Image (cartoon, grey):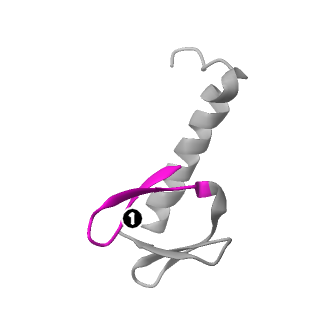
Amino acid sequence: MIKLNRLNNTEYFLNSDIIETIEMTPDTVITTVHGKKYVVLETADEIIDRIAEYRKRIYFFGAGALQPPAGS
């Protein structure tokens, strides 16, 4: 889940695994695999960075499968 902001600046969390597309029109519009659309304040690059950080956390710390990298 990644934290996003609606246009009225309220926060919510979205499951990044269901994101199909991110468009800049000029507002950022996220479309899910279910066809639902979300308009957010974040840019496409910010969303992609948040997805990468979330997946990195899951990979390194999720399910106890791996230990955190040395120095973390």
Q: Quadrant of residue 56?
A: top right
Question: From what the image shows, is residue 4 above or below residue 29?
Answer: above
Which kind of residue does numbered mark 1 sit on?
A: Glu
Element type where label 1 sits in the image = loop
Q: Crowdedness of circle 1 by 10 Å Cα count: few (<14), some, many (20+)?
A: some
Give the image location of residue 30, x and y in percent.
53, 72
Question: From what the image shows, is residue 4 above or below residue 24?
Answer: above
Q: Nearer the viewer, residue 36 or 27?
A: 36
Give the image location of residue 52, x and y in percent.
57, 48
**Is 14 included in the stretch rendered in magenta?**
yes
Is residue 55 found left or right of 72 in the rendered image?
Answer: right
Q: Residue at x 60, y 20 (%)?
A: 68
Q: Residue at x 68, y 21 (%)?
A: 64
Q: How many numbered discs, if any? A: 1
Give the image location of residue 49, x and y in percent.
50, 52
* First to last magenta residue range: 1-16
Give the image location of residue 61, x and y in percent.
61, 26
Of all residues, the one furthest to the left in this rendering is: 8
**Is 69 included in the stretch rendered in magenta?**
no
Q: Residue at x 62, y 36 (%)?
A: 58
Residue identifier under label 1: 42
Of all residues, the one furthest to the right in this rendering is: 65
Of all residues, the one furthest to the bottom in this rendering is: 25
Is residue 64 found left or right of 22 in the rendered image?
Answer: right
